[in-house]
Amino acid sequence: MQTNKLALGIIGCGNIAGQYARDLTTYPELELVGVADMDTPRAEALASSSGARAYPSPQALMEDPAIDVVVNLTTHLAHKEVVTQALNAGKHVYSEKPLALSYEDAKGLVELAEQRNLRLGCSPCTWMGEAQQTAWKLLREGRIGKVRVVYGEMNWGRIESWHPAPAAFYDVGPLWDIGVYPLTFVTTVLGPARRVMATGKVLYPDRVTKEGVPFHVTTPDFVTGTVELEDGTLVRITVDFYVSQKGKQNGVELHGDLGSVYLGSPQHYNTVVEHAEFNQPYQPVPYVREPYNGTEWGCGVRDMANAIREDRPHRATGAQAAHVVEILEAMARSMQEGRPMDVHSSFAPPTPMEWGV
């Protein structure tokens, strides 16, 4: 099945698929063979723009022995079903986030991949970016000493102002959609979580799509909470679908005994990185290498595919994604029950990028 290039198939040809295809078609060790979607014209449009084949159905793509890796870009609610089907079809899988909408389901997917001796990867891989690797290097070098407090802010604006199909985002809410970015970065660089407390609210219930169609929001569109890590570090997380991305409270700020590191965004690879000694002003930090402009969505797929070829662990693992799902689930339960919730799972920590050491 495997030749000089690993063959990829995308399932789910929505808004993000074009950005994945843009990256995946530039990697010499990979080949985007085909795409599939329940909406056949949408698959045909992506196939035409990317030079891939449009399969008549997702099942047909998964059953094709020519495909090595399925890249699952379906909506949040479909992730568990599509990952399960692809693993049972004998394919390695890289999925968009979150891995599933419950920890039980996410853990089951990790176990299924292990049983089938297949790789399971999951976004976000954005901690692999140059800015994020630069910030992590500062931490490993001890530039700010023991980290005790982290602020993670993701103000994602009003999805309907820019996305053609906002309903799926509001169905799951910002906790599950964008909370994964700061939580994945923080657990990557500082380790797993053990306890959470959260609160949330629907701030802006009645909204209108770009086409002028009104819709009603019932899932909290604003969530804030505290996550206590295994080493005692406290992480304050705020996520919402109300405040503009241009607001001043954005990014990840890590505070230690000797100073602080500020990362302008956990998502964009060329975001600002700044360092300050305690009680001193922030100063810009040069990147470990020239950064990608924006977000390289395909880098997690590329790392997993190369790990398969090189017989090494891949970095954006299903196990870490499942741990993040447990954090999200615990925060959601904390919102509902008004009390702290424990987190029990763990994962093997990923290694920095070779060029980020």
Image (cartoon, helix red, strand yellow):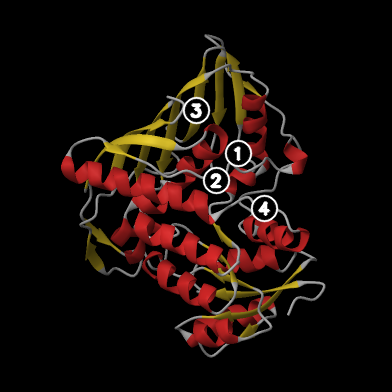
Q: Between label 4 and label 2, give the one nearer the viewer.
A: 4
Element at label 1: loop
Look at 40% across and 51% down and name the residue there: 325
- In the picture, the disc for residue 271 is 1
- In the picture, the disc for residue 253 is 3
Label 2 and label 1: CA atoms lie apart by 8 Å
Residue type at numbered disc 1? Thr
Specify the farthest residue to the bottom.
56
Up/down of 14 relative to 195, above or below: below
Q: Is residue 248 visible?
A: no
Residue labelled with disc 4 = 313
Up/down of 296 relative to 341, above or below: below
**Mark 2 burial class by Cα count in 10 Å: few <14, some 14-19, many 20+:** many
Q: Between label 3 and label 1, give the one nearer the viewer.
A: 3
Element at label 4: loop
Q: Between label 4 and label 1, give the one nearer the viewer.
A: 4
Label 3 and label 4: CA atoms lie apart by 29 Å
Q: Do callouts 2 and 1 mark residues in contact (Cβ within 8 Å)?
A: yes
Of the pair 28 and 140, the residue shown nearer to us: 140
Where residue 308 sits: x, y (%)?
71, 62
- In the picture, the disc for residue 101 is none
Residue type at numbered disc 2? Gln
Residue type at numbered disc 3? Glu
Of the pair 268 and 132, the residue shown nearer to us: 132
Specify the farthest residue to the right.
4
